[in-house]
């Protein structure tokens, strides 16, 4: 997946999980539904990315976007008050593409050590 595809990811996944059910952490049915939805996003993204650790990289990207969604739409962090979806996609693109565009067999960050 190249940078253009990652921009599409930010523009499509963010709106799709913008309004997760507030009960997803307390109601087993809502939790199962959200887990299935997010697992499907991870599977689709990892399949498109391919390469080493694709599933883990995809899970980190999807989880990050979910965290962004919660911070923006549920916790209403001040920094997001004036931000449009376009602003969010533009600023988020670099950290999404860092994980999405890593070529197979290459890491952009030093390997973790046991001390980490």
Image (tube, rainbow, N blue to C red):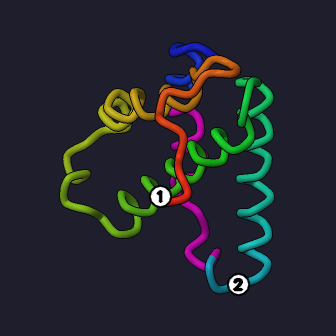
Q: Does residue 14 show up magenta in the picture?
A: yes
| Marks 1, 2: nearer the viewer | 1
Residue 79 placement, left or right of 55: left
Could you tell me residue 31's position as x and y percent? Answer: 72, 73
Residue 6 placement, left or right of 1: left
Give the SS element for disc 1. Answer: loop
Q: Does residue 17 show up magenta in the picture?
A: yes
Marks 1 and 2, Cα distance to the nearest angstrom?
34 Å
Give the SS element for disc 2. Answer: loop
- The quarter of the displayed image where residue 53 is located: top right
In the image, what residue occupies the spot 55% across and 32% down? Answer: 99
User: Badge 1 is on which residue?
Assistant: 116
What secondary structure do most residues of the magenta stretch adopt?
Answer: helix
Is tag 1's residue or tag 2's residue first in the polypeptide sequence? Answer: 2
Q: Which residues are magenta?
A: 10-24
- The quarter of the displayed image where residue 111 is located: top right
In the image, what residue occupies the spot 64% across and 74% down? Answer: 24
Could you tell me residue 32's position as x and y percent? Answer: 79, 70
User: Badge 2 is on which residue?
Assistant: 27
Whether 100 is drawn above or below 13: the answer is above
Q: Can residue 27 be seen here?
A: yes
In this rendered view, identify the residue nearer to me: 48 or 75: 48
């Amino acid at each position: 997946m190249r940078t253009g595809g990652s921009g599409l990811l930010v523009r499509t996944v963010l709106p799709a999980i913008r309004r997760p059910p507030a009960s997803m952490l307390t109601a087993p049915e809502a939790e199962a539904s959200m887990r299935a939805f997010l697992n499907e996003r991870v599977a689709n993204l990892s399949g498109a990315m391919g390469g080493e650790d694709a599933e883990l990289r995809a899970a980190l990207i999807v989880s990050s976007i979910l965290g962004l969604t919660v911070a923006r739409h549920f916790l209403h962090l001040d920094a997001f008050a004036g931000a449009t979806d376009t602003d969010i996609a533009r600023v988020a693109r670099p950290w999404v593409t860092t994980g999405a565009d890593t070529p197979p067999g290459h890491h952009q960050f030093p390997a973790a050590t046991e001390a980490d």
